[in-house]
Amino acid sequence: MARALLLVVLILQLGMDVPAQSYRSDLFLKYNYKTHKTNKPMPFDHPFTMSIYGMPKVNVKDVYLMESEVKHGERKLKGYVAQGMARVEENEVYVYDTKVGFTTSGDSLILYMPALLPNVYFDIHISITISEACRQLLHQSMLDYMAGKPESRDKYVGFLDCSSAPEMNIRQGYLSYDDFIGFFNQDLKADFSKLTAAATYTTKPGIKVEDLQAIDIASKNIGSYAFIDSAPYMEAALHQAYDGVQTGLMKLGSTEPIGASAFMERIAGIESNVALLRKLVDRIDRVISSGQTSVALPGGQPINMLAVHAAVEEIITASLANRDAIQGGLQAINDKLDQNENMRQMFALVGNTISSDLKTTGANILFLDLGLASVQLPGLDGQLKSMQTPYWGLSIYFRPIDKSTRRESFPTKKDLNPNPTIGPDYGVVSRYSVLQHLALNVGLTWGPLPNSDFSNLYDNYSLLVGPSYRFARAFKASAGAAFARRSSANPLISEKEVVMGYYVSLSLDVDIVAGVKDFTKLFTK
Amino acid sequence: MRALLCVLCLALALGCAKDVSLEDVMGTLEVSTNKFNADGASTIILTTTISNDASPDRRDVVFNTTAGTFPNGKQEETVKATYVKGQLTATIALTAPMVPGTITLAAGPAFDTQSGDFKRTTIVTADPSNLSQVVINLSSLSMKNDFQSEVTITGTLKNQEGGKVSLGTLISFDLMTQPYDLSPCNCARFRSVKAVSDENGQVSAVFGVDGTFANTTLYATILYQQYPYTYYYVTPIQVQP
């Protein structure tokens, strides 16, 4: 009865600990993008789902796992030096280990992680579309190239730095400057030429100083409507900058010109200009509404306010058309850039990204076994003497083992077909390996040996050492060397000598330590 | 690779039983003499040594013989080896048998093992103990010549040293008219003749005489033939009518 009650409590506890799981996922855990911490240790040998929350809004294209290592106290990607790839300055190649499936949900990026090898550091590299800041650098490089300026190359390097993972200068996908120019000439040049060509944009005659003076006089005539905010318009009129205002190269109210390649700034500038011009239209409307359709300047020159109104409207229309032209051209270029896998921006998650070891998850490399061994020891007559004896022992695995894993679901080396040059090389992915089964068995026999010529190696125990193979999760078969004591071949010597024989054994993994831990947890929680 | 080879060598070293030779265990089996008389009294001393590496509880040596006896009266006795002049030594005396022949002597460790036979053996000869003296006793010094009175003659056969003769020494009885002469009286009748010596070296017979001789001294004689000689041992007896 008590045993059934314990079982029910255990099941309930397990039920509470395990959140909803995704398909092909054994665990679900959360990764805080701001603190770079997970809510629980990452498992090994288990596929799991990880939700990265608190991320900036980005357009994720691919997610890569990259093996990293800690050398001399510094964590860095595991790579090798080669020409022409990845790390720009050092020409060091970091082959990605595997791509990870993902979905996005709100501000969360949900990754479907494969089963990982134990105790492997890895970075999660998230490949996104290029940010606006980096795009501007690229556009400047393209503009300089079009203008035949050698600075184009430096600006492209600036773009690479901008679009690589911050501080690590790592990126997935890479085009050298020459390769990029090839891509530009083939796919982008036409759109870019159109975007930078003067013929693409329409401009209307700008507002004259006299027009603004007339608006000012008319405003004063109305009384309370002094044209005190005329400075931006006047400045542009005095400098004859209304062409720039309409094409976004000049922003009303600002003396700083906008760069031709700063297309997004130009669009913003145009929209700002249009907003100010609409205010001007409002003012002209009030003037006309007050009956002043024609205003005489101090010199007597009449200004037709209806004509001024129409001119400003034309400027607004032309500005919006120019904005649309920039947006359309930019969209065409960006679409082609985004379609190129080598033109991406990276950022990396490098905090607490390690599949955990035994200290954090309790998974062991040591297991306790109980079984039966058949020991063959050389007798005094030179013949092998067979003895059967119970034994208990330790299985020492060559890597951490989690007994709850479904090893048969791991891919085999054949299944993975790695590409060691560009990736994936599956360096961090758990594979079906003999090391998940193979262990070193160190056992001690239990009780006296049945043959009087022999006695145990020490006290009541003889030593068994050999490889063991785990099967069906908890069973182990082992064979190896057995060490015991045997009567001396010299009948005058009563002290027994150590002899080595052989053993085969079958044992059951009892895992007493884990059992005790689970049991005590019931009372200590 | 080197470590693996070391482990393999260690394993082989532990796995192979070391060969132990007889010399590693036992010294030679020495005897005080190779020949002695099969008189049931002579002795020879057997001495053997064992390895000084012997454990204190493994120093017993078992002696065996095919004839004769050890001090315990049996043909096997265990002796604990002790240090003699720095060498573990076991010594025992063998008493000669009464029957001549070759005797195989053996000495080995008392602890038995499957690893081999560690016994030292040697052969000694028990030579016949030949008759050299006879002590004759008569049940009476005179007798009547009518076959009515009988006299028992008993001879105790001895070798040259006065010891026993070997078992089975054959003699014959007769009654002579003259001592030390081949002149039988042809008047005696012997019965219950025991002409072969027993373990005490004794022979005996009962005899009576007819009326051929009266008031005469005749000589009860034990004859012992050892080719090419015949030895006579006589004692007088008075014959009366």
Image (spheres, rainbow, N blue to C red):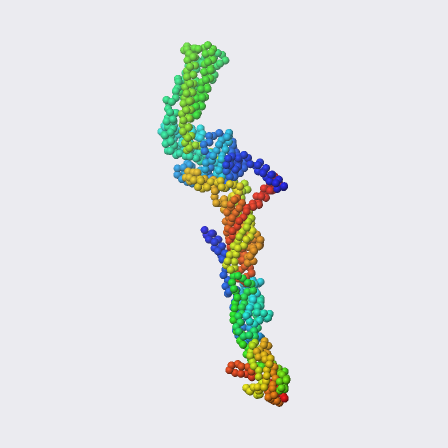
On screen, residue A406 versus residue A10, left or right, reads left
A208 or A318: which is nearer to us?
A318
Residue B41, compared with residue A43, is above or below; it is below
For residue A91, which quarter of the picture? Answer: top left
The N terminus of chain A, quarter of image: top right
For residue B150, which quarter of the picture? Answer: bottom right
The C terminus of chain A, quarter of image: top right
Q: Residue at x 48, y 45 (%)?
A: A434
Horizontal and vertical percent position of residue B17: 50, 59
Whether residue A63 is visible, yes or no, is yes
For residue A138, which quarter of the picture? Answer: top left
Horizontal and vertical percent position of residue A272: 45, 21
Horizontal and vertical percent position of residue A304: 42, 12
Residue B185, compared with residue B16, is above or below; it is below
Horizontal and vertical percent position of residue A255: 43, 22
Residue A309, compared with residue A523, is above or below; it is above
